Image (spheres, rainbow, N blue to C red):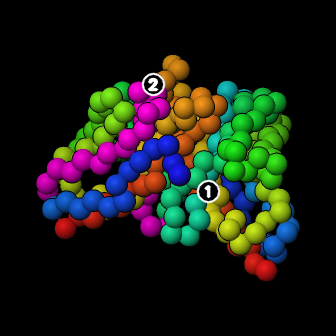
């Protein structure tokens, strides 16, 4: 089992706001980063560090952290945001890394 | 631009080994760690391990200890991941991904290779 726990599936109406969460005790010490994966494609970094977005990632993607929970928020979800989302962080062992189980986002 | 290009699809028999390559371009190869991640069909991402910039140190996920070997050739800017004693459970897409860090509390993977599909049959 993963040290990072995500809800398997979340849905959001087009244009509405959705939050995808990632829980793990290691998140009290380490930041989470977030990846988007569309079918048949390699994962794509969408958020890193202190709420930073790589070039080309829309500003509707943002992140926050509280206690042992990291959240990815999409404000005004678009059809192209429909994908699997994974959180990633350093494991409590400090020499390994770990992914959350992934959340499938459906945009209705 | 920074790019990771992986070797092509592989088909192996149970019990065999596979060696996947990942060639880097567009950045200082010996300044970055490289991770390997796999994804079984219909499943999530699974971290396998990491190799340090000089290729002298590795950390493997416990699940793969004794069965995986990660190496790098700095002269050709290429990383390798070899997995032995293959079973059908190893059927997956294997990715390399460059490690980027900020301080001691935040790490991310960017970019990723295009993935190498591996099929293991009996």
Q: Position of residue A40 (x, y in %)?
A: 49, 67
Residue located beneath label 2 in the image: A29
Q: Report which quarter residue A57 is drawn in.
A: top left
Identify the subunit bearing mark 2: A
Magenta part of the chain: A15-40
Residue in view at x 71 percent, y 42 percent: B60
How far, Cα to Cα, is label 2 from label 1?
A: 25 Å
Q: Is residue A17 magenta?
A: yes
Check disc 2: other Cα within 10 Å, few if <14, some if 14-19, many if 20+: some
Residue in view at x 70 percent, y 65 percent: B90
Q: Secondary structure at mark 1?
A: strand
Q: Position of residue B115 (x, y in %)?
A: 61, 59
Identify the subunit bearing mark 1: B
Residue B7 seen in the current view: yes
Q: Secondary structure at mark 2?
A: loop
Residue located beneath label 1 in the image: B38
Q: Residue A106, relative to residue B82: is it above or below?
A: below
Whether tag 2 and tag 1 are in contact, CB under 8 A, the answer is: no
- With A63 as the anchor, is A93 left or right in this view? right
């Amino acid at each position: 089992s993963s040290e990072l726990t995500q809800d398997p599936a979340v849905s959001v109406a087009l244009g509405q706001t959705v939050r995808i969460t990632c829980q793990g005790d290691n998140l009290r010490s380490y930041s989470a980063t977030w990846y988007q994966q569309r079918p048949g494609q390699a994962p794509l970094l969408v958020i890193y560090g202190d709420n930073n977005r790589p070039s080309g990632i829309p500003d509707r993607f943002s992140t926050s952290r509280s206690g042992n929970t990291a959240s990815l928020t999409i404000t005004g979800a678009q059809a192209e945001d429909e994908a699997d989302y994974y959180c990633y962080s350093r494991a409590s062992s400090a020499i390994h890394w770990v992914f959350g189980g992934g959340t499938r986002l459906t945009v209705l | 631009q920074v790019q990771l290009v992986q070797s092509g699809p592989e088909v192996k028999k149970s019990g065999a080994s596979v060696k996947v390559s990942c060639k880097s371009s567009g950045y200082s190869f010996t300044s970055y760690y490289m991770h390997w991640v796999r994804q079984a069909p219909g499943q999530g991402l699974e971290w396998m391990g990491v190799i340090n910039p000089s290729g002298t140190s590795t950390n493997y996920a416990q699940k793969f200890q004794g069965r995986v070997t990660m190496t790098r050739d700095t002269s050709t800017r290429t990383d390798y991941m070899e997995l032995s004693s293959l079973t059908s459970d190893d059927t997956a897409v294997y990715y390399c991904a460059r490690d980027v860090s900020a301080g001691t509390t935040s790490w991310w993977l960017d970019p990723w290779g295009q993935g190498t599909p591996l099929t293991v049959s009996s």
